[in-house]
Every structure is written in C-alpha cells, then in structure tokens.
C-alpha cells in the first residue's frame, strides 16, 4: 500500500516537473530566446532550467507532439519553422478569431489585468529602445487575457496555439514595429476598458492587418 502511494506521489511530481519544463520552453520560444530552426541540446537546457533530463525529455516529447518541435533523421530535436505562406494563413485565422474574442470580451475582461498590461506597455514604450522580449511577453498575455474573458475554452486554446505557431516564423521584429505594435495594443486596451465591443474588434483587426502589411513590406524589400 505504502509503495503504491509512494509511486503515485513520484509520478505526480514528475508530471509537475514536466509541465514546468514545458511551460518554460514555451516561454523561451515565445520570447525568441530559442529561435525557429534551432537545434535543442538536452544537457544545456536541463542546466538552464534547473531540471533533470527525465522531465525535460517528457516536455520535449509533448512539444514535438504539438508540432512545435520536429525530430531530425539523427534523432535531434529542433524548433519547427513556419513558412511565410503558413504565417499568412495563421494571420487570416487570427483576424477572424481574435477580433471575435475582443468584441465578446469587452464587457467581461478584468479591468485590473488590462491596466497592468497598459502600464507595462507604456513603460516599455518610454524606453529609448523598447524591449522586444517584453513586447512579445505582453503581446501573448494580452491576447490570452482577451481570449480567456470570452469564457470559451476551445476558442482560447485555438488562439493560443495559433499565436505560438506564429512565433515559429523567422519574420524579423524591428524596433520601429515594436513601438507601433505597442500603440496598437494600447488602442485595443482602451476600447476594452470602455466596454466598446465594436471598437475593440476594429482595433484588433487594425493591429493584425498592420502585422500582415509589415510582413509583406519586409518580403518586398528583400
């Protein structure tokens, strides 16, 4: 009996550690500390995360199953890469889903969460050179807060998955676009704080349209 309890406790602990590793890896991908196409080295990652390789391997296997990592012929794992065509398709779906979420969330999204993000954006924009990693962290949190406020768990899951996949592109985020995107985020937040669903939807569409225009401009300039 005691042996069974002990095994269950150990299994639960390993599961918690694996989820912790998964979340940490996702954050590194979101903030582009691990870049698309980069080959992952287990020992180095385990040291960086302060974890043993067993829960790390479990987390890597989960992310591989989710399509965020891919296995090479030599069994090494690398971060998946999203093509330009895939990225444009992701943006198309995000326009439909994120704008709907913004409209629905206008009367339910927690004002406190929005104001915290608003302060972080303003602080980042006040810097001589806005932080890209901070912008990316805010970007994901804002879209997640909005999606969560719809009360639709599947919608939130799909939006977050699309957001993660968009981060697997090699589209360069230049400082001027970080500043502009921050201002667009503030416009979305302002509409949400005023409970104006139609305005929030339009502000979200403008933001994602500008992301698309920015990408197309980059491609034309190459």
Image (cartoon, rainbow, N blue to C red):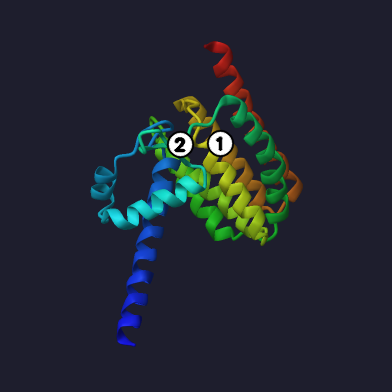
Residue depicted at 67% across the width and 59% down the height: 152
Q: Can residue 146 be seen here? A: no
Q: Answer above or below: position of 27 versus 215.
A: below
Q: Residues within 10 Å of mark 1 (few under 14, many from 20)?
A: some
| Residue 91, percent from left and from top | 64, 34
Name the one closer to the observer, 97 or 213: 97
Residue at x 48% of width, y 48% of height? 119
Of 184 and 156, the residue lying toward us: 156
Q: Residue furthest front?
A: 73
Query: Which image quarter is the N terminus in?
Result: bottom left
Where does the image place residue 139, in percent across and percent down from the top left?
52, 43
Q: Please provide percent x and percent y for residue 96.
A: 72, 41
Q: Which mark is residue 75?
A: none
**Which is nearer the eye, 121 or 147?**
147
* Sequence-first tag of 2 and 1: 2
Which residue bears the numbered disc 2?
A: 125
CA–CA distance in space, label 2 to label 1 = 8 Å
Secondary structure at badge 1 equals: helix
Taking the image as shown, residue 161 lies to the left or right of residue 77, namely: right
Residues 172 and 199: in front is 172
Q: In the figure, residue 69 lies in which quadrant?
A: top left
Whether the residues at callouts 2 and 1 have beta carbons within 8 Å, the answer is yes
Q: How far across and down, in percent of the image, does residue 24 sit? A: 38, 51
Total numbered badges shown on the rendered structure: 2
- Label 2 crowd bin: few (<14), some (14–19), many (20+), radius 10 Å: some
Q: Secondary structure at mark 2?
A: helix
Q: Residue at x 60, y 53 (%)?
A: 157
Q: Is residue 198 visible?
A: yes
Relative to 158, does residue 89 appear above or below in the rendering? above
Instruction: List the residue tagged with mark 1.
Output: 183
């Amino acid at each position: 009996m005691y042996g069974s309890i002990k095994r269950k406790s150990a299994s639960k602990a390993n599961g918690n550690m694996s989820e912790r590793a998964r979340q940490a890896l996702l954050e590194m991908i979101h903030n582009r500390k691990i870049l698309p196409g980069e080959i992952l080295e287990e020992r180095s990652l385990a040291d960086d995360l302060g974890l043993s390789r067993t829960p790390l391997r479990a987390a890597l296997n989960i992310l591989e199953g989710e399509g965020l990592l891919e296995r090479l012929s030599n069994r090494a794992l690398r971060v998946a890469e999203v093509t330009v065509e895939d990225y444009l398709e992701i943006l198309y779906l995000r326009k439909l889903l994120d704008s709907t979420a913004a409209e629905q969330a206008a009367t339910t999204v927690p004002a406190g969460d929005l104001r915290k993000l608003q302060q972080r954006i303003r602080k980042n924009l006040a810097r001589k050179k806005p932080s890209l990693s901070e912008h990316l962290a805010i970007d994901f949190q804002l879209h997640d807060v909005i999606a969560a406020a719809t009360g639709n768990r599947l919608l939130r899951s799909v939006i977050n998955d699309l957001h993660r996949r968009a981060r697997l592109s090699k589209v360069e985020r230049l400082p001027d676009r970080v500043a502009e995107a921050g201002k667009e985020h503030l416009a979305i937040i302002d509409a949400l704080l005023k409970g104006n669903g139609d305005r929030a939807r339009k502000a979200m569409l403008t933001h994602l349209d500008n992301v698309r225009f920015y990408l197309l401009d980059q491609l034309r300039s190459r």
